[in-house]
Image (cartoon, rainbow, N blue to C red):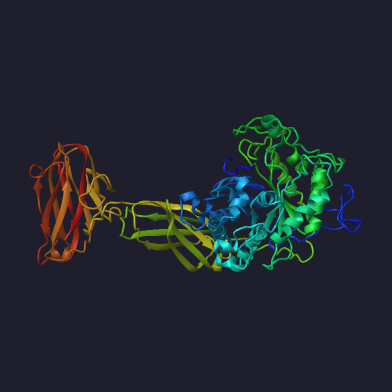
C-alpha cells in the first residue's frame, strides 16, 4: 500500500435518472443534478491541488492558483517526530504555511499504520486496543484544537484505506468490537465500542471541541467489498458492491447517527502508483484504465470508475474528493524517478483530466459527484509534478492547470443547503520583519529581543504582532502585541525581554495577524537567530557580554574593537582590541560619561600577548570640564605585565571628582605592530 514517508467550461445538466433505484447508466447521458452539497467553506468549483511537504515551495513559486495542498499526518506528527513539544505545532505550521500559499490545507490523517502492533493487516487489532486508541484519539484531539486555532477551513481525510481494512478484517460487520468508549477519552464515553463507533468518534470529537471549520472526509476503497471493482472484478455489477460497503459505513457516520453530525464528503484514490510501475516493477499490467469515452461500464476504464463514483454519490448523498492521483503521463521514461526530467512511469490520468478532451472528462466526473482532484505520488520513485516534462518542454500538470484556471475553471452546482461562497475579502496587507538579539546572553539572564515590522503594502488596524522563540525542542517563548496598527510603509519596533533557561541555539519567528487572530497576514519562520551561552555572565558594569556597550577608540595604532567569545576574564565574552599600526604611537579605548561615583575603585582586567610591541598600558578616568579635565591613571610598563594572562589593574577615582568625561585604557607601542589585546570585566 502507500508509503507516505518515502517520497469558459460549464456543467451540462439536462437529463434525469430513470427508475426507482440508482443503477448503471450509459456514460453519454448526463444527470439532472449532483447529489449532496458542497461543504460550507469550500468553493463550488472543481478544485485542483497537490501533495506538498512542509517547507516545500513548488506551489508558492509555480504561479498557478492551486486550490488545495495536502500532506500525510503519520504517527509522530504531533511532536514533530520527537523534535518538538507534544502540542501539534508541526500540523498547525503546515496549515499556516498552506494559507500563506493561498491554498486550503488538507490533512491526510494516516496515523494508524504507525501505531505499535503491526501494519495494515493489524488495523482492526489496533482499533481494538484501548491503550492504542487512547493515544490515537488523543493525538486527533490535538489536531482538532490546532484546526480550531487556525480558524479557516481545513479538509481532514480520515485514514486512507482504513475503513476498507476494517470492512475486510471485520467481515463487513459494523458491530465488531473496537475500543472507543474504552479508550478513556471522556468525549467518547457515550459511543459504542464498535468499529462503527470508531468512525463516529472523529465526529464526536469535532462536536465536543466545536471545530466548525473542520471538513471531514471518509475514505471509500474500491476493493472494500472484497471485490476490486476498478481493476480485477470489472464485469461485476456495481450497485451491489456499493450497497454492501455503504451499509457497513453508514453507521460510521455517513448516515444520521448518535453524534448528530455526519461526514461531509467521500474520499477515494484511483491508484497509489503510476500504472506502468506495476507492469515494469511488479509484472502486473492490469492497472491501466481505458480512456475512451465509449468504453463500456463493464471494462477496466475511466467510465466504470466514474459510474462507481456516481452510484456512491446518489446512494450516500455525498460529494467526492479524489486524492493521491498518480502523475505519470505518456512522455515519461518508465524509470525510477530520481529527479531528472521525464523520470517516472507511464500513466494516463493527468492527461485524461487535463489533456485532450479534458473539458468533457472533467464534466463527466463532476456529474458523478467529484468536486476536487488532488495529485500526488503515493510511493517513492513515481512521476512527480516537479519534473513531469512533456513533449512541449513544459511541466505538464503545472502548465495545463494554469490554462484551466485561466479559462475560468469548472463551476459545479453547490447543491441544496450549501452556502454560497463568500465575497472575496479585500486585499490583505503585506509585511516584512526582522529580529535581533545583541550579544550572547546566558541562562537566567535577560535576552533583549528587538523585532522590526514593516507594512510593505495596504494597512491594518487593531491587529496582532506575535513574537515567538524556538529551540530544537519547539516553542519556548512568546509575546503578543495587540492593537497593532500600520499604514503602508510604516515600520514599528517591538521589544521582548525574554529569560532563557538553558544554553543553545534559538530562532525568533514573527507573525502578523488580523484582530482576533482571524487572518494571517505575515509569518517569518526565521526573523532572527541567537545563541545562549552556557558560560555565566560577567556581573561587572562593562563585561561586553552583549556587545561593545558603546565603547569606542581613537588614535593611530588601534584599528578596531569588538565583543568576542575567544577569551574572557568573566562570563563568556570580552572586548577585543585590534592593532595594525604602521609606526610607534598611541590609542585610547574609551567609554564616554561612565556612571562612576567619586571615590570609587575601578578594576580593569587586561590581557596582552607575549612578544608584543606594547610599551605601556594605562587604565584611567578623566573628569569633565568642571573638574578641569583632570586625568587619573595607573601607568603600567609592559615589563610589569604578565603576557598571556589576565592582569588586574586598579584606578581610584578622586574623592572630590566631578562627573567623569570618560573612562578607558591608553595603549602605547614602541614600533609598528599587528596583534590583539583584550579588556574585560571593568567594574567598581
Above or below: residue 29 compared with residue 250: above
Q: Position of residue 476 (x, y in %)?
A: 41, 58
Q: Position of residue 259 (x, y in %)?
A: 67, 67
* Foreground of the two, 273 or 615: 273
Give the image quarter of residue 590. bottom left
Query: In the figure, is residue 570 to the left or right of 447?
Result: left
- Label total for image: 0
Q: Does the rendering let one see residue 239?
A: yes
* Foreground of the two, 504 or 277: 277
Q: Residue at x 21, y 58 (%)?
A: 540
Q: Does the rendering let one see residue 365?
A: no
Q: Position of residue 85 (x, y in %)?
A: 46, 56
Say which quadrant the N terminus sits in. top right
* Foreground of the two, 17 or 146: 17
Query: In the figure, is residue 663 to the left or right of 340?
Result: left
Say which quadrant the C terminus sits in. bottom left
Give the image quarter of residue 183. bottom right
Q: Position of residue 235 (x, y in %)?
A: 84, 41
Query: In the figure, is residue 344 to the left or right of 659?
Result: right
Query: In the figure, is residue 626 to the left or right of 351?
Result: left
Above or below: residue 491 compared with residue 472: below
Q: Residue at x 32, y 52 (%)?
A: 440
Amino acid at each position: 500500500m502507500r508509503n507516505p514517508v518515502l517520497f469558459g467550461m460549464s456543467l451540462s445538466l439536462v437529463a434525469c435518472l430513470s427508475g426507482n433505484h440508482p443503477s448503471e447508466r450509459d456514460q453519454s447521458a448526463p444527470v439532472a443534478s449532483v447529489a449532496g452539497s458542497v461543504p460550507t467553506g469550500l468553493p463550488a468549483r472543481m478544485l485542483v491541488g497537490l501533495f506538498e511537504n512542509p517547507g516545500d515551495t513548488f506551489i508558492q513559486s509555480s504561479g498557478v492558483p492551486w486550490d488545495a495542498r495536502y500532506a500525510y499526518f503519520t504517527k509522530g506528527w504531533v511532536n514533530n517526530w520527537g523534535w518538538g513539544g507534544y502540542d501539534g505545532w508541526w500540523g498547525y505550521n503546515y496549515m499556516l504555511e498552506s494559507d500563506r500559499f493561498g491554498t486550503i490545507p488538507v490533512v491526510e490523517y494516516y496515523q494508524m499504520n504507525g501505531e505499535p502492533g503491526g501494519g495494515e493487516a493489524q488495523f482492526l487489532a489496533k482499533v481494538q486496543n484501548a491503550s492504542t486508541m487512547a493515544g490515537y484519539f488523543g493525538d486527533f484531539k490535538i489536531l482538532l484544537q490546532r484546526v480550531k486555532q487556525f480558524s479557516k477551513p481545513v479538509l481532514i481525510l480520515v485514514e486512507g484505506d482504513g475503513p476498507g481494512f476494517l470492512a475486510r478484517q471485520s467481515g463487513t460487520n459494523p458491530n465488531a468490537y473496537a475500543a472507543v468508549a474504552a479508550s478513556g477519552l471522556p468525549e467518547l464515553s457515550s459511543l459504542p465500542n464498535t468499529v462503527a463507533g470508531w468512525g463516529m468518534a472523529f465526529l464526536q470529537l469535532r462536536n465536543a471541541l466545536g471545530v466548525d471549520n473542520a471538513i471531514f472526509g471518509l475514505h471509500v476503497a474500491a476493493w472494500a467489498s472484497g471485490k476490486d471493482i476498478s481493476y480485477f472484478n470489472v464485469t461485476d455489477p456495481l450497485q451491489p458492491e456499493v450497497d454492501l460497503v455503504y451499509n457497513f459505513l453508514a453507521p460510521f457516520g455517513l448516515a444520521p447517527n448518535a453524534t448528530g453530525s455526519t461526514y461531509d464528503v467521500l474520499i477515494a484514490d484511483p491508484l497509489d502508483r503510476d500504472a506502468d510501475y506495476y507492469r515494469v516493477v511488479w509484472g502486473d499490467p492490469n492497472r491501466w484504465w481505458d480512456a475512451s469515452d465509449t468504453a463500456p461500464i463493464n471494462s477496466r476504464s475511466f467510465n466504470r470508475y466514474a459510474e462507481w463514483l456516481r452510484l456512491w454519490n446518489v446512494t450516500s448523498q455525498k460529494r467526492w474528493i479524489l486524492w493521491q492521483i498518480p502523475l505519470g503521463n505518456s512522455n515519461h521514461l518508465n524509470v525510477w524517478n530520481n529527479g531528472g526530467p521525464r523520470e517516472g512511469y507511464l500513466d494516463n490520468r493527468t492527461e485524461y483530466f487535463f489533456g485532450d478532451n479534458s473539458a468533457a472528462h472533467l464534466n463527466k466526473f463532476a456529474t458523478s459527484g467529484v468536486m476536487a482532484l488532488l495529485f500526488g505520488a503515493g510511493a517513492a520513485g513515481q512521476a512527480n509534478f516537479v519534473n513531469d516534462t512533456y513533449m512541449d518542454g513544459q511541466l505538464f500538470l503545472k502548465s495545463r492547470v494554469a490554462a484551466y484556471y485561466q479559462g475560468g475553471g469548472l463551476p459545479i452546482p453547490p447543491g441544496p443547503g450549501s452556502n454560497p461562497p463568500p465575497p472575496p475579502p479585500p486585499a490583505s496587507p503585506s509585511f516584512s520583519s526582522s529580529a535581533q538579539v545583541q550579544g550572547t546572553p546566558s541562562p537566567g539572564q535577560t535576552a533583549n529581543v528587538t523585532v522590526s515590522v514593516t507594512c510593505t503594502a495596504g494597512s491594518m488596524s487593531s491587529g496582532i504582532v506575535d513574537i515567538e522563540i524556538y529551540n530544537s525542542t519547539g516553542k519556548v517563548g512568546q509575546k503578543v502585541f495587540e492593537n497593532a496598527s500600520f499604514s503602508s510603509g510604516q515600520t514599528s519596533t517591538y521589544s521582548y525581554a525574554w529569560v532563557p533557561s538553558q544554553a543553545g541555539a534559538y530562532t525568533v519567528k514573527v507573525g502578523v495577524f488580523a484582530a482576533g487572530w482571524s487572518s494571517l497576514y505575515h509569518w517569518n519562520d526565521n526573523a532572527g537567530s541567537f545563541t545562549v551561552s552556557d558560560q555565566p555572565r560577567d556581573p561587572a558594569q562593562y563585561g561586553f557580554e552583549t556587545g561593545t556597550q558603546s565603547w569606542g577608540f581613537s588614535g593611530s595604532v588601534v584599528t578596531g574593537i569588538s565583543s568576542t567569545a575567544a577569551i574572557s576574564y568573566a562570563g563568556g565574552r570580552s572586548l577585543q582590541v585590534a592593532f595594525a599600526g604602521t609606526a610607534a604611537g598611541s590609542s585610547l579605548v574609551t567609554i564616554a560619561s561612565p556612571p562612576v561615583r567619586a571615590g570609587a575603585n575601578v578594576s580593569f582586567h587586561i590581557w596582552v600577548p607575549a612578544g608584543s610591541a606594547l610599551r605601556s598600558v594605562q587604565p584611567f578616568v578623566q573628569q569633565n570640564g568642571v573638574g578641569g579635565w583632570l586625568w587619573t591613571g595607573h601607568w603600567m610598563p609592559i615589563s610589569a605585565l604578565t603576557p598571556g594572562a589576565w592582569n588586574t589593574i586598579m584606578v581610584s577615582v578622586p574623592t572630590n571628582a566631578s562627573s567623569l568625561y570618560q573612562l578607558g585604557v591608553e595603549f602605547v607601542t614602541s614600533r609598528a605592530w599587528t596583534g590583539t589585546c583584550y579588556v574585560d570585566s571593568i567594574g567598581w
